[in-house]
Image (tube, rainbow, N blue to C red):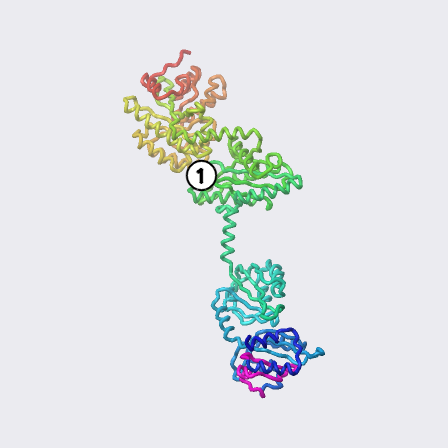
């Protein structure tokens, strides 16, 4: 044990009882220690100092006797709070430990670690104070250098004096001027986010008052330029040697803004859709389960609306992915703007959205919301400076009627949405138990349809068109047929809507177009008279901006001259976006291809556009031909269509001709061509070639 350890050990009790002889012994020991030792009277006046004191301070023994050491050693940078604290403790006869900035006789600034303890006689009266002072300038300088080099805001707080040592990076982390000593409590609260005040004020005393030995808290601090940055403050109570009750606080402030940003990004990626910012499936299921728990307790109801945009793939292909994304964002924003704040709108991917309606009172409430959304969808969206119209199909499932958990409700709302698609789109349907079988049947059909092209299960049949006067074959229409190995012949009315709904119609349309052109060219190469081949074009296929190029590709691949190809389009396909249709039609006409309007009279034609469209032929729909000549309305409509065509220099063909009466009436009204079972059903290529070589088809005698 060295001399200083003996003195320090004897000076650490809160109260020391010593006799005069014991004080002399203590003074004798202190004579040989490297630390300054001071003995004062009860008023704090110096009675004795050792040689280390005179060496450290530069004052002689005679110069300090009877003087107050606190006043003697003050300088321009002394901390007034520390001086006042020392004076108060001495006045009360209490000991203390602290660090203080002192000044030697020559003005040298140095840091002292002071341990002051009272000495009482046997009667308990205060007789003296003993102070042991250690020059810690060198170690403090090392500490300060460590603080200054640290990139974190490090602070050290002495509870006894409220003195704070701050690293140079402490306040500059936030754009403020660093200070050597500061009340951290007030400074932090002044620049702390108001929402974090309560948490910070509740945490800080637990460290400063020694309630816990260490802890940390995260909160936001306003920088000097007004931005908010996240900070983590860690504090630890450090006990001083020889005194179980004394402690100071060491703390670190770290700027964790980037970590918080990354955490927020991870949270966003985990629970929110990256494109629209809506909830994703994970968050949606969590919110549904929460709402279900509340609904069960309160015996309430909730509803899920499963929304899918109609024909989005075609729109997306036309706009490009960037335009498609803009449309999805616009749809999300439009729906969000009209639903209650407690509702949850989620995007499951693609063009699928789910809306959770918690605390629903009646099923009719869900229907009202669905109708409102459909009305909103009817309004054009501005995408890439173009007005884009898109509709939606909505399925509705409710709790408790249609499911008791999130997965079941989503599945049943999805099934109801498919039912809405099958009902014609742009509508909504409530879930019904029977939908499952119907939808599964449709899904199986869809899966087999996807493989039909790969497995070469499609084929074409051909129905002749004959001149109404001579009954000679003047053309043909190519019609698509699908024979599935397991399902057998699948009617076009069953699989064409599915192909359109799932984006399969374009590759199927290309297959039809290419094979029809190839077959027509093969017949011509075999020496048959050159005739025009008509091919039906889906509205979705026609809307594809690459359609004219695909027509040209089919002609180039087959070598068929363009005048022997005719494309049949419905009125609906042309009038959906009439201005765009005019441009596309002119592109097709520039190729030399003919254009016909199929099923004329059943759609919503505009006569003004009919004069603008570069149309070569009108096809009278079979619904009018069926009642000829006995129904006056059908007869008058047929006469009107023929009259319009003649005035616009168009040819006219009537389809669905099944009786001699149909043929004779149309012949009399100067209809150009006839097509129907009266002359031939659609037949395969071999049988059609036989008809073609005959040249003329005789109708049964009337």
- In the picture, the quarter occupied by the C terminus is top left
Q: Nearer the viewer, residue 130 or 263?
A: 130
Residues shaded magenta: 33-62
Disc 1 packing (10 Å; few <14; some 14–19; many ≥20): many
Number of numbered labels in the structure image: 1
Residue 687 placement: quadrant:
top left
Q: Nearer the viewer, residue 466 or 374?
A: 374
At x 56%, y 28%, the residue is 434
Can you name the residue that lies furthest to the bottom here? 62
Above or below — where is 84 with respect to 419? below
Q: Picture coordinates of residue 324 (x, y %)?
A: 45, 42
- Badge 1 marks a residue whose secondary structure is helix
Above or below — where is 198 with respect to 309? below
At x 54%, y 30%, the residue is 436
Q: Picture coordinates of residue 624 (x, y %)?
A: 47, 22
At x 50%, y 67%, the residue is 169
Above or below — where is 479 with respect to 200? above
- In the picture, the quarter occupied by the N terminus is bottom right
Q: Picture coordinates of residue 676 (x, y %)?
A: 41, 19
- Residue 48 among those drawn in magenta: yes
- Residue 214 among those drawn in magenta: no
Can you name the residue that lies furthest to the right here? 123
Q: Nearer the viewer, residue 254 or 583?
A: 254
Decide if residue 527 is on the left or right side of residue 167.
left
Residue 155 placement: quadrant:
bottom right
Q: Which residue is mark 1?
A: 315
Can you name the residue that lies furthest to the top here? 701
Above or below — where is 32 with respect to 237? below
Q: Picture coordinates of residue 237 (x, y %)?
A: 58, 65
The reply to whether residue 123 is visible in this rendering is yes
The reply to whether residue 670 is visible in this rendering is no
């Amino acid at each position: 044990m060295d001399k200083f350890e003996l003195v320090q050990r004897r000076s650490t009790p809160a109260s020391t009882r010593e006799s005069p002889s014991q004080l002399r012994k203590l003074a004798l020991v202190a004579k040989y220690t490297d630390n300054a030792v001071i003995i004062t009277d009860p008023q704090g006046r110096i009675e004795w100092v050792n040689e280390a004191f005179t060496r450290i301070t530069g004052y002689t023994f005679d110069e300090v006797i009877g003087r107050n050491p606190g006043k003697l050693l003050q300088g321009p940078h002394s901390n007034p709070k520390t001086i006042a604290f020392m004076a108060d403790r001495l006045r009360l006869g209490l000991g203390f430990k602290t660090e203080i900035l002192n000044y030697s006789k020559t003005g040298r600034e140095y840091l002292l670690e002071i341990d002051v303890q009272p000495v009482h006689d046997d009667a308990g009266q205060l007789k003296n104070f003993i102070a042991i002072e250690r020059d810690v300038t060198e170690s403090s300088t090392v500490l300060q250098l460590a603080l200054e080099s640290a990139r974190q805001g490090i602070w050290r707080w002495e509870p006894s004096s409220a003195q704070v040592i701050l690293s140079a990076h402490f306040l500059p982390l936030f754009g403020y001027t660093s200070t050597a000593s500061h009340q951290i409590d007030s400074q932090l609260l002044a620049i702390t986010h108001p929402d974090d005040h309560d948490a910070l004020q509740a945490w800080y005393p637990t460290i400063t008052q020694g309630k816990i030995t260490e802890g940390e808290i995260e909160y936001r601090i306003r920088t000097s330029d007004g931005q908010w940055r996240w900070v983590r403050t860690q504090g630890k109570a450090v006990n001083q040697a020889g005194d179980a009750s004394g402690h100071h606080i060491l703390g670190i402030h770290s700027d964790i803004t980037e970590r918080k940003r990354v955490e927020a990004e991870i949270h966003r990626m985990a629970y929110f859709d990256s494109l629209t910012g809506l909830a994703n499936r994970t968050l949606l299921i969590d919110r549904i389960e929460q709402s279900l728990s509340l609904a069960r307790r309160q015996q309430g109801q909730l509803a899920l609306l499963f929304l899918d945009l109609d024909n989005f793939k075609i729109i997306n292909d036309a706009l490009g992915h960037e335009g498609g994304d803009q449309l999805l964002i616009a749809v999300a924003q439009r729906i969000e703007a009209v639903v209650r704040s407690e509702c949850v709108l989620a995007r499951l991917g693609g063009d699928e959205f789910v809306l959770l309606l918690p605390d629903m009172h009646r099923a009719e409430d869900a229907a009202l919301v669905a109708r409102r959304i459909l009305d909103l969808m009817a309004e054009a969206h501005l995408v890439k400076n173009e007005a884009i119209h898109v509709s939606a199909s909505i399925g509705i499932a409710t709790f408790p009627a249609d499911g008791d958990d999130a997965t079941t409700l989503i599945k049943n709302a999805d099934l109801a949405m498919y039912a809405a698609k099958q009902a014609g789109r742009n509508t909504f349907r409530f879930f019904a138990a029977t939908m499952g079988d119907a939808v599964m049947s449709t899904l199986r059909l869809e899966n087999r349809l996807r493989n039909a092209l790969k497995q070469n299960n499609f084929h074409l049949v051909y129905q002749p068109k004959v001149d109404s006067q001579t009954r000679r074959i003047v053309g043909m229409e190519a019609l698509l047929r699908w024979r599935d190995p397991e399902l057998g012949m699948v009617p076009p009315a069953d699989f064409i809507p599915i192909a359109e709904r799932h984006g399969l119609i374009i590759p199927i349309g290309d297959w039809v177009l290419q094979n029809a052109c190839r077959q027509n060219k093969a017949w011509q190469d075999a020496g048959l008279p050159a005739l025009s081949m008509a091919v039906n074009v889906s509205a979705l296929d026609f809307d594809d901006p690459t359609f004219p190029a695909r027509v040209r590709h089919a002609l180039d691949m087959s070598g068929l001259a363009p005048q022997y190809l005719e494309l049949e389009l419905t009125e609906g396909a042309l009038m959906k976006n009439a201005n765009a249709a005019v441009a596309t039609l002119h592109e097709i006409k520039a190729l030399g291809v003919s254009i016909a309007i199929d099923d004329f009279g059943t759609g919503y034609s505009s006569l003004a556009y009919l004069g603008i469209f570069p149309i070569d032929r009108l096809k009278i729909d079979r619904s009018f031909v069926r009642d000829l000549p006995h129904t006056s309305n059908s007869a008058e409509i047929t006469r009107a269509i023929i009259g319009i065509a003649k005035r616009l220099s168009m040819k006219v063909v009537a389809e669905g001709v099944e009786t001699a009466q149909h043929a004779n009436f149309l012949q009399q009204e100067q209809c150009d061509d006839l097509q129907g079972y009266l002359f031939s059903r659609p037949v395969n290529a071999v049988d059609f070639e036989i008809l073609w070589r005959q040249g003329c088809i005789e109708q049964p005698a009337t």
